[in-house]
Amino acid sequence: GDDRLACILNKLLFEQVPVLFDDLVEELYVSRSTLSNDFKKIRQMLAEYNLTIESRANKGVYVSGEELDKRRFIMSYFLEKISFLKHCILT
């Protein structure tokens, strides 16, 4: 759900390293198809800020785009979810 999307976005935007799809499947206890659907939603959300999800073999997925656009997205998305974000970082 929404909490899972927030966790995925947290990893993609704050950990500054590409995330392996299979690692996310294990970490979030979801199927590959569920995660694929999550990424479809995330792509749509990021597209409004001129950001894209890039994928490289053996390197994983990461957010591509201007730093300013990433910050704009972070401000609008995460400020609404700040209490969840704290939980996400702590666990």
Image: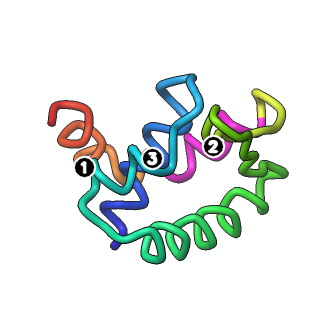
Residue 86 or residue 34, whichever sits in front: 34
Q: Marks 2 and 3: which is nearer the front?
A: 2
Crowdedness near tag 2: few (<14), some (14–19) or many (≥20) residues, C-alpha within 10 Å? some
Query: CA gap, disc 2 to disc 1?
Result: 23 Å
Query: CA gap, disc 3 to disc 1?
Result: 9 Å
Residue 84, numbered circle = 1
Residue 25 or residue 1, whichever sits in front: 25
Q: Which region is colored magenta?
A: 69-78
In this image, 74 relative to 70: left or right?
left
Query: CA gap, disc 2 to disc 3?
Result: 20 Å
* Residue 55 position within the rendered picture, expressed as x and y whole percent measured from the top left: 72, 46
Q: Residue furthest top?
A: 16
* Residue 30 position within the rendered picture, expressed as x and y whole percent measured from the top left: 31, 67
Residue 78, numbered circle = 3
Q: Quadrant of residue 86?
A: top left
* Residue 9 position within the rendered picture, expressed as x and y whole percent measured from the top left: 49, 47
The residue identified by callout 2 is 61
